[in-house]
Image (cartoon, helix red, strand yellow):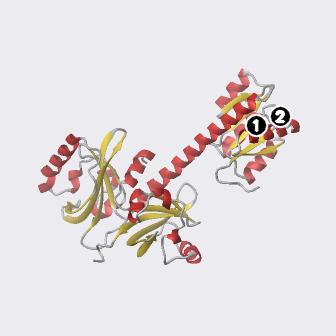
Amino acid sequence: MEHTGDAIRVLHVDDDPAFADLTVRFLERENERFEVTTARSASAGLERLVAERFDCVVSDHDMPRTTGIEFLETVRAEQPGLPFILFTGKGSEEVASEAISRGVTDYLQKARGTEHYAILANRIGNAVGSYRAERMVERTRSQFEAIAEHTLDAIVTIDADSRVRFANPAVEDLFGYAPDELEGEPLLAIMSERYHASHLSAIDRYVDTDERTIGWSNVEFPAKHRDGTEVPVSISFGEFEHDGEKRFIGIMREVSGTPQYGGQDPAFLEALVETIGVGVAAYDESGTLSYVNERFAENLGTDKEHLEGTAIWEINPVLDREQFDAYWASFEPGETRTAETTHSFEGTELPVEAVTTCADIAGPTYHFGTVRDISEDLG
């Protein structure tokens, strides 16, 4: 059977063939997205789970050799988050209580008639929806975290008191401070003293306006290195909210030459990457763009929804599929490259500087990085 991306694959484990066949028929009738596979024992179910991907397990409890709860424990050891629904005809409060303590997702007793199949189908749908959402959050968090940790530009975020709340590893190359040395300290630590008063005054004025967005600015500014010397930097900055608090983000690179490149929660990292001021993208071995931020899409005159799912060679005219495969294979894990190229999409062409890093993110390998419009640099 060909499995569509929208399908919900259910493994139903029950030693009663007649009941198992009936369950398959009613579940697939209740929800056309369901693809139900049956196994006649817990051991057969485990073999299926090893060989195939499933979105949910539905299991009887009273089975020969292995109970449903024992089966649950084995599944939890291998796939902790996989939805597991105990669907049994010989349940009791004691069984339900033990199943809950062992991490069952849901518990439902079999009943006469067909109404309980609709209830089961609804609970499967809800459990899988939550499971997929959690996995998406984890993948997104991992991507944002990797981008923040490996981008070649120094990134800091500050609160309304101008205190550093986040700094990425690149700040050490630019300013001489390790990230944990800056976090919690005033931003003034990397600013020349002559700018302290005006900076604090500007922050106060902005906070008082209570405007949500000040837009993006790109300015050149003499920052201060740990050793006291001034470092001329180009700064892109903006603002976002985190847990109801106003935050500011700054992305910095040295002006006088080539920059020296070197666990936050998902909402924070998403806000950071979406307001970073340069294009950000990630793609896997298939070449499909799994994530782009708004700036990346805006640079090509479109929106995120049109670009995510697009193959990288469709926006990079110097690549075809065969060349992409060779390019992907040429990267070493953890390697970062900087290149000037051209991106195009639906008639919009843009010269860019792309900084690409190869890294494992929550299991799969991705290429991710930043893309900067260099049309003004080229005159």
**Rendered residue at 33%/57% (across/down):** 155
**Rendered residue at 81%/46% (across/down):** 44
Residue at image mark 2: 63
Q: Is residue 142 visible?
A: yes
Identify the amino acid type marked 2: Met
Classify residue 259 by image quadrant. Answer: bottom left
Classify residue 110 by image quadrant. Answer: top right
Q: Position of residue 119 (x, y in %)?
A: 70, 31
> Dot 2: what SS?
loop
Q: Please report contact status of discs 2 and 1: CB closer than 8 Å, yes or no.
A: yes
Q: Residue furthest front?
A: 347
> Dot 1: what SS?
strand
Q: Is residue 104 left or right of residue 178?
A: right
Q: Position of residue 260 (x, y in %)?
A: 33, 69
Q: Quadrant of the N terminus?
A: bottom right
Identify the amino acid type marked 1: Ser
Residue at image mark 1: 59
- Seen in the picture, residue 82 relative to 258 is either above or below; the reply is above
Classify residue 170 by image quadrant. Answer: bottom left
**Rendered residue at 72%/38% (across/down):** 30
